[in-house]
Image (cartoon, rainbow, N blue to C red):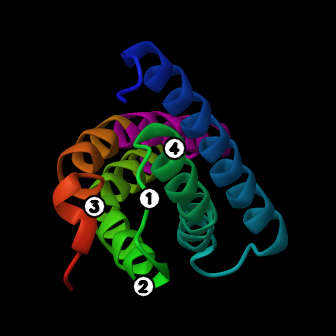
Amino acid sequence: MTKPALTIAVLYTLFASLSTIINIGTQMLSMWLYKGLYAIEISILAGTATGLPLRYLLEKRYIFSFKSDNIRHDGQLFVLYSFMGVFTTAIFWLTEYTFHLMFADESMRYIGGIIGLSIGFYVKYRLDKKYVFVSGNRKVMM
């Protein structure tokens, strides 16, 4: 049974917001803990790494109602899901880093991150719907 579009939109927005909070919060924590060489790049990477697994689990279950056949299949889907995220992560990172370079202000960098994440989440949903959580991926082959 397909979920109504409004339900999907609300849930996806909720999950994206939660992921954004986790991502930006991790970046802030990372910047507080480490201020050395490549601190900004490390914080962006850390933020990405903390939000991804949670989003995968929530979206797989509540957005796409997709059930993996077994743990291996689930791992393969996570790799495919993560691969699709490479493109959207690039949007996020590029936007956040552009804001950092343009404004040289921590708050503006985080605003750039939120904008980049928002655009990336929309694109990611479209990619996942078309390529990841589809019936043809019942048996993902790597």
Nearest to viewer (mark 4 / mark 2):
2
Secondary structure character of the magenta stretch overall: helix
- The x, y position of residue 90, in whole percent, is 32, 58
Q: Report the side of 130 relative to 37 (left or right).
A: left
Of mark 4 and mark 1, the one earlier in the sequence is 1
Q: Which residue is mark 3?
A: 84
Q: Secondary structure at mark 4?
A: helix
- The x, y position of residue 77, in whole percent, is 35, 70
Q: Residue at the spot x=32%, y=49% of the render? A: 91
Kindly report the distance in space between the C-alpha atoms of the residues bearing marks 1 and 2.
Answer: 12 Å
Of mark 3 and mark 1, the one earlier in the sequence is 1
Residue stretch in magenta: 101-121
Of mark 4 and mark 2, the one earlier in the sequence is 2
Circle 3/circle 1 CB separation < 8 Å: no
- Magenta stretch holds residue 113: yes
Structural crowding at the residue carrying mark 2, measured as other residues with C-alpha within 10 Å and reported as few (<14), some (14–19) or many (≥20): few
Kindly report the distance in space between the C-alpha atoms of the residues bearing marks 3 and 1.
Answer: 19 Å
Kindly report the distance in space between the C-alpha atoms of the residues bearing marks 4 and 1.
Answer: 31 Å
Q: Which residue is mark 4?
A: 113
Q: Which residue is mark 2?
A: 72
User: Label 1 sits on what residue type?
Assistant: Lys
Nearest to viewer (mark 2 / mark 3):
2
The image quadrant of residue 8 is top left
Q: Report the side of 7 relative to 77 (left or right).
A: right
In the displayed structure, 97 sits above or below 38; it is above
Kindly report the distance in space between the C-alpha atoms of the residues bearing marks 4 and 2.
Answer: 33 Å
Q: Which residue is mark 1?
A: 67
Kindly report the distance in space between the C-alpha atoms of the residues bearing marks 4 and 3.
Answer: 19 Å
Structural crowding at the residue carrying mark 3, measured as other residues with C-alpha within 10 Å and reported as few (<14), some (14–19) or many (≥20): some
Nearest to viewer (mark 4 / mark 3):
3
